[in-house]
Image (cartoon, coloured by chain):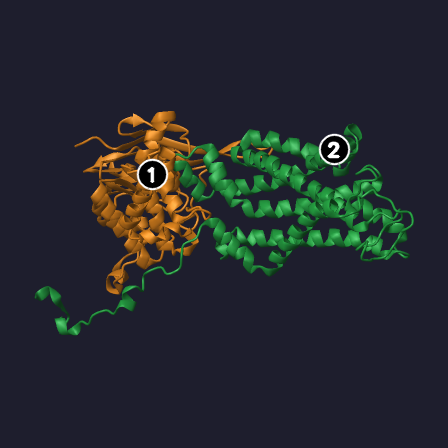
Chain colours: A green, B orange
């Protein structure tokens, strides 16, 4: 029994006692493993502001869709006997100078404003991410040419594009959206390019390369996934900016044409009446403000939630 | 003697330095004419100070960098220009373990996904179930629990992450692994564990290693043979014990005299060779022998000619002192 000797203690069976079951399971992992999206949702829920933002945005979306359908009024139905009415049971948000129901008009405006915002963000997302990722990943001459094109386009003021497109294609929803996208995808492309350039030198993308992963696999599974945080932040910046652009165009008189209305046109229509009928300005402005705020909170929450390091 | 599994002949890796519009184009000679061979089942240690081209050599072997000149032969086949199917086969045979376990795992993938990725890329198993089983098996080989499969890398310590990295490398059953300072980012206590793991795997799976490190005592422990690099050149190659006990090249002597000895009595008697001057820039290396600017034995000849590797016993030394 020479081997069992440690210095001068002789190991005998009496020195040992049996483990009880609690210690046996000490190494066992107790909590359930969850998938990436489940984890992200769990983290998102912990951020109360983001959750409130999301709920508000969903309510806004649902109301924009439903209210104009179920309401007895239409967005262009005039009632000249009821001009500038205050809030009442018939007209929850009152009426405007032609006696049109404000609630229906704001919800119809919400449809247009939100659609412009989300569509612009979605198109910028796809175009910008693909363009930026290819430019950043390939680098060298390809990157040089691709980025000089962006620089050249960037040197023209944003609003000029939008106005040119709207003038050329006529003032409608599609032309405004295209104009807005023409300028916003470049921000996204630059953002993604920078991210991809730093990430592609990191050891995990080198490791994927050494494992024999193809270009598209490295790009989509390793580089773009890891740029998701900044991409989402940029997207949530684009939505409100697109809504503002649309409102600004409406102010210039080349936006959504009357009698249709977006939040921008509603606020502008009523801006002269701010001292006499303030509620007519406050309602659309409130809609814009709260939507922007919600989008910002959601963006913040998503940025944290999608990053597993911030558990 | 059998054929070497890896043979590097006159390998040069030069990087262009982006000059301004008016300045001349310059090149960094990161690796400038390396020759060495690695036998099947052998561990070849590559040492040298920071910036001497160790990692560049390793990366050129796994084709992250393309060599400017020279050949890298794996199993008798030049791999510097291979493409398509041959390249994919080469990827299965030659893998790499990276230095920083915090950077070498994709933070957005679970451990299972990370280890399964090489199998997904090369379509090794037909069903998802088989891959999953293999992942569990690999986790056990590297000393992790199969339950860890759905965790993310940030939930692990440095040593555990390095084990995950090793499991990923082993997924393809490689014959040759380039270990690029796999332990330098770890705690000393963890270093020993990882080294033992690497040694066990080598015994079990008959893998050859190119082990890059700057910790000489660790390299001596794991390596069969050692190559010492200085400024993109190989100055000495020999059996690990020989190089360690009787260094021949003046640079190796200086390098080894810097290794701390854990015995104050012996340490006090030891004479430390302190090198004069700075490490020259690899953009403009000295003429002739690159070490001559700091060598205590430099002669006029060292400035004119570049010393060729000479055989001294079973060693090779690039120095005129041994001609």
Q: Is residue A89 left or right of residue B107?
A: right
Where residue A81 appears, as percent x and y from the top left, is 92, 50
Where residue A54 appears, as percent x and y from the top left, is 62, 53
User: Residue at the location (40% across, 56% down)?
Assistant: A32
Callout 1 secondary element: strand
Q: Is residue A96 above or below residue B289?
A: below
Residue topped by disc 2: A175
Closer to us: A206 or A75: A75
Q: Is residue A169 left or right of residue A276?
A: left
Closer to us: B4 or B46: B4
Which quadrant of the figure has residue A166? top right
Report whether residue B182 is seen. no
Closer to us: B193 or A223: A223
Callout 2 secondary element: helix
Q: Chain of mark 1?
A: B
Which quadrant of the figure has residue A156? top right
Query: Can marks 2 and 1 be said to lie on one chain?
Result: no
Report whether residue B318 is seen. yes
The label shown at residue B108 is none
Give the distance between the C-alpha atoms of the residues marked 2 and 1, in whole angstroms.
Answer: 53 Å
Where residue B159 appears, as percent x and y from the top left, is 35, 54
Q: Is residue B161 above or below residue A141?
A: below
Which quadrant of the figure has residue B232? top left
The answer to whether marks 2 and 1 mark residues whose Cβ atoms lie closer than 8 Å is no
Residue topped by disc 1: B95
């Amino acid at each position: 029994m020479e081997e069992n000797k440690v210095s001068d203690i002789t190991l005998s069976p009496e020195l040992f006692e049996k483990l009880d079951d609690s210690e046996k399971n000490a190494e066992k992992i107790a909590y359930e493993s969850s998938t990436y999206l489940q984890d992200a949702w769990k983290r998102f829920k912990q951020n109360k502001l983001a959750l409130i933002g999301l709920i508000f945005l969903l309510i806004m979306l649902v109301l924009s869709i439903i209210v104009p359908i179920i309401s007895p009024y239409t967005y262009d139905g005039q009632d000249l006997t009821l001009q500038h009415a205050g809030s009442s049971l018939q007209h929850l948000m009152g009426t405007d100078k032609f006696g049109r129901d404000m609630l229906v008009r704001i919800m119809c405006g919400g449809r247009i404003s939100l659609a412009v915002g989300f569509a612009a963000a979605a198109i910028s997302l796809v175009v910008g991410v693909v363009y930026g990722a290819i430019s950043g990943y390939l680098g060298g001459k390809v990157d040089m040419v691709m980025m000089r094109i962006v620089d050249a386009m960037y040197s023209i003021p944003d609003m000029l594009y939008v106005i040119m497109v709207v003038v050329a294609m006529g003032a409608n929803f599609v032309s405004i959206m295209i104009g807005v996208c023409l300028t916003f995808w470049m921000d996204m492309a630059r953002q993604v390019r920078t991210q991809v350039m730093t990430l592609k030198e990191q050891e995990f993308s080198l490791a994927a390369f050494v494992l024999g992963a193809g270009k598209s696999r490295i790009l989509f599974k390793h580089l773009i996934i890891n740029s998701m945080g900044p991409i989402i932040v940029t997207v949530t910046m684009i939505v409100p900016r697109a809504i503002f652009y649309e409102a600004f165009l409406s102010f210039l008189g080349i936006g959504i044409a009357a009698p249709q209305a977006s939040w921008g046109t509603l606020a502008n229509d009523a801006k002269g009446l701010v001292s006499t009928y303030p509620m007519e300005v406050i309602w659309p402005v409130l809609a814009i403000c709260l939507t922007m705020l919600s989008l910002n909170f959601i963006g913040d929450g998503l940025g944290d939630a999608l990053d597993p390091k911030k558990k | 003697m059998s054929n070497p599994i890896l043979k590097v002949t006159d390998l040069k890796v030069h990087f262009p330095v982006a000059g301004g519009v008016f300045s001349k184009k310059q090149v960094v000679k990161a690796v400038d004419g390396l020759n060495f061979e690695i036998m099947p089942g052998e561990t070849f240690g590559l040492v040298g100070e920071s910036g001497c081209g160790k990692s560049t050599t390793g990366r050129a072997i796994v084709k992250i960098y393309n060599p400017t000149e020279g050949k890298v032969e794996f199993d008798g086949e030049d791999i510097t220009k291979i493409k398509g199917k041959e390249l994919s086969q080469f990827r299965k045979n030659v893998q790499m373990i990276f230095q920083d376990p915090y950077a070498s795992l994709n933070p957005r993938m679970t451990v299972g996904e990370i280890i399964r990725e090489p199998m997904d890329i090369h379509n090794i198993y037909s069903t998802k179930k088989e891959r999953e089983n293999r992942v569990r098996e690999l986790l056990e080989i590297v000393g992790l629990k199969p339950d860890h499969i759905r965790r993310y890398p940030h939930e692990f310590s440095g040593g555990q992450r390095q084990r995950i990295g090793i499991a990923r490398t082993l997924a393809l059953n490689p014959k040759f692994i380039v270990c690029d300072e796999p332990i330098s980012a770890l705690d000393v206590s963890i270093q020993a564990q990882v080294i033992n793991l690497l040694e066990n795997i080598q015994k079990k799976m008959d893998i050859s290693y190119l082990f890059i490190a700057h910790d000489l005592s660790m390299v001596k422990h794991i390596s069969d043979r050692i190559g010492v690099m200085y400024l993109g050149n190989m100055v000495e190659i020999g059996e690990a014990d020989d190089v360690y006990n009787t260094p021949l090249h003046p640079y190796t002597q200086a390098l080894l005299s810097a290794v701390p000895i854990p015995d104050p009595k012996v340490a006090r008697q030891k004479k430390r060779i302190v090198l004069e001057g700075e490490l020259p820039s690899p953009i403009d290396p000295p003429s002739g022998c690159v070490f001559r600017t700091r060598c205590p034995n430099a002669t006029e000849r060292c400035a004119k000619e570049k010393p060729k590797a000479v055989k001294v016993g079973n060693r090779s030394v690039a120095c005129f002192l041994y001609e």
